[in-house]
Every structure is written in structure tokens, then in C-alpha cells.
Image: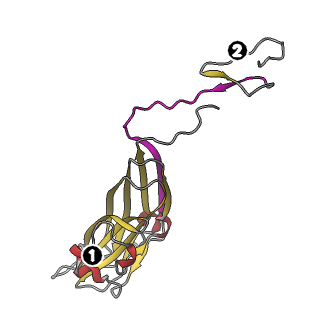
Amino acid sequence: MNVSDNNKLFEGSNDQVLVSQGEGLPPLWKTLRIPEYEANKFYLIFNNSFSDKTGVTFSSTEESTNGSSRSTSFTKNVAYSTLNRFKKIAALSQPITIYSAQSKTYFQFETVVQAAFPVNGDPDISIDYACGIFVDDKLVNLRQRNIKASSASSTFITHNQIGIADNLTKGQHTVSVACSRLKSYNTNVNLGIGINVATNIDSFITQSSLKVDVYEVPQVFNTILN
């Protein structure tokens, strides 16, 4: 038994139990850590956000050949290595760990896209681009957009993208984001995704972020005793 300095028997605290250490050793008070959960319910297991100020830049000569075959090229689980001229946003490639067979992983990607356009004319000046979210270099979500010149030069827009992956295998995975320039219309200017290509904004404004939330039906538990 635990005894205090004045030789009184220590009776433990709330939420503690007396645990044997084996023959010849005094028992110890241990705190119980019992998670409150309901069977077959999803719980938030992992949550983190990542940022990148480097981004990716594309010249007019770096257009992807996938731009002419989008419906057949951009399919679920297609390998990153098979996509033409997609560039990863470096600091958004991050590891995550899945602990249970049932899981839902949510991704939220946000960045600023800028083109060094002049003032828009007739015909319109614009660029098609795409960004994909990958898990282990397999495509799980993709968004295509068009950035169009406006009444002011060096147009920029905010790009938001949300994706989900169900029941990733248990173990460690790598999440990444990659983008590509698909097609240009009446222009050969540079395109920046997550990085500025003109001086009317800077890398603080254009920086990219990726938020990852993993919900699981718990199957793995740590010891309940402290």
C-alpha cells in the first residue's frame, strides 16, 4: 500500500484503481483512461494542417498533354507518374497513419492561382488548369478550373478543393497535391499556383494550405492505465 509521510494509508484518487505489481511488491494506484465511444461510430483520430509558400510555376511550353484527353486521363486512382506535366506542391506532401479498417479521410486544399495576364481583350484571354489530391501517388480528387484575364492586369483567383477517401488500408500513407497547366487561350504568359508571378501580390497571399481530417471506427486502443 502507498503510505504518506505521516504514515496514513493513501486511499487513491477519483478514477484510480489499485493494481498489483506481482508477488512481493506493493500494489500501486493507477488512473483509468477509458475512452468514451459508441460502437460503429466514426471519431476524429487525426487532424492537421500544412502550408507551402513555394508553389509551382508553368510557362506556356509546359502545358499537359492530358488537356486534350481529360475524361480518360483524369480517373480515380490513376497513378501520378502517368499524368503529364503535373507538379507537386512540395511542402504539402505529408505522411498520415490509418489505424482502423473503417475510415473516412477528408482533404481541404486552398491556394491562390495567378497568371501574368495583360488587361483582357477580344477574344478572351484565359488558361485552363487542374489540381489533384493524391494518396500514395494515386489520384483521389481532382478539380479543373479556368482563370480568365480581367479589367486589371495580373489576375489572381482563390482555388478551393475538398476531397474524401474511404477506407484507406491500415498503416502509413503519403498525401500530396499536384497541379498542371492544361490549355492556354490567346496567351503565353506564366501561370503560378501557390506562388505569385507578378508583383501585385506576394508569396504570403498566394501560399497553399492542406487540411487533413481522419475519422475512424476505432479498433486500436492504447493501455487504459496511467
Counting the numbered discs, the total is 2
Label 1 is placed on what type of residue?
Answer: Ser
Q: Identify the residue position indicated by label 2 in the image.
A: 11
Percent across and percent down for residue 212 are: 43, 53
Percent across and percent down for residue 99 are: 48, 48
Instruction: Say which label, 1 or 2, has the lower sequence index.
Output: 2
174 and 20: which one is in front? Answer: 20
Q: Is residue 46 magenta?
A: yes
Residue sitting farthest toward the front: 23
Instruction: Name the side, left or right, on which 39 lies relative to 14.
Output: left
Residue sitting farthest toward the bottom: 61
Q: In which quarter of the image is the C terminus?
A: top right
Quadrant in the rendering for residue 146 = bottom left
Specify few, some or many for label 1: CA neighbours under 10 Å numbering under 14, 14-19, or 20 or more: some
88 and 24: which one is in front? Answer: 24
Q: Give the range drawn in magenta.
A: 26-51
Residue 73's label in the rendered image is 1
Is any part of residue 197 visible from this angle?
A: no
